[in-house]
Image (cartoon, rainbow, N blue to C red):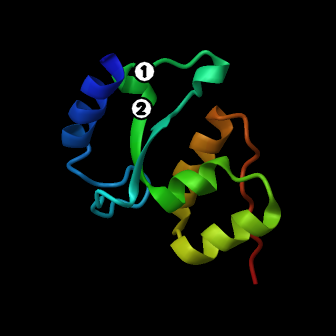
Amino acid sequence: MEYNDNRISLMAGQNGKCAVTGEPLCIFDMECHHKKPKRLGGTDEYRNLVWLKSDVHKLIHATEEDTIAKYLDILKLDDKALKKVNSLRLSAENLEIVVKAN
């Protein structure tokens, strides 16, 4: 119950936009992410949740280099968005993504 109530409140709190990209969320392309995963002691509290585009959520949890590269190519994140992704990745105990300059 707490989880569903907080997800609804959070959607309003984020103005219906992805917390990483700032793009409007679509019902079939959005996922609610636990900043600190439940397996690591995270809760369903409002402050531990964030709405993301589905591809951003997949990128946060991706561990294989080819999968990370795929979602980076799809999303084309700027430095600010990548910093947000990396912050969420670290909270989920995943490694930071380092983009090599061409």
Q: Is 29 in front, or is 16?
A: 29
Q: Quadrant of the N terminus?
A: top left
Residue 53: image quadrant is: bottom left
> Of callouts 1 and 2, which one flags the residue occurring earlier in the amino acid sequence?
1
Q: Is residue 92 visible?
A: yes
The CA span between labels 1 and 2 is 7 Å
Judging by the rendered image, the residue that carries numbered circle 2 is 49
Residue at 65%, 35% (x, y): give it.
92
Whether residue 13 sits left or right of residue 41 in the image: it is left
x and y, in percent, of residue 95 in the image: 76, 45
Residue 17: image quadrant is: bottom left
Amino acid type at mark 2: Leu
x and y, in percent, of residue 75 in the image: 52, 71
Q: Residue furthest right?
A: 65
Residue at 64%, 43% (x, y): give it.
89
Is 88 rendered above or below residue 63?
Answer: above
Is 40 rendered above or below residue 12?
Answer: above
Judging by the rendered image, the residue that carries numbered circle 1 is 44
Q: Mark 1: few, some, or many residues within 10 Å (few <14, many ≥20)?
A: many
Q: Mark 2: few, some, or many residues within 10 Å (few <14, many ≥20)?
A: many
Please report contact status of discs 1 and 2: CB closer than 8 Å, yes or no: yes
Q: Residue furthest bottom?
A: 102
SS assignment at label 2:
strand
Q: Is residue 80 visible?
A: no
Is 34 rendered above or below residue 86?
Answer: above
x and y, in percent, of residue 3 in the image: 35, 23
Residue at 20%, 48% (x, y): give it.
15
Whether residue 29 sits left or right of residue 15 in the image: it is right
What's the mark number on residue 85?
none
Q: Is 22 in front, or is 62?
A: 62
SS assignment at label 1:
loop
Residue at 61%, 50% (x, y): give it.
60
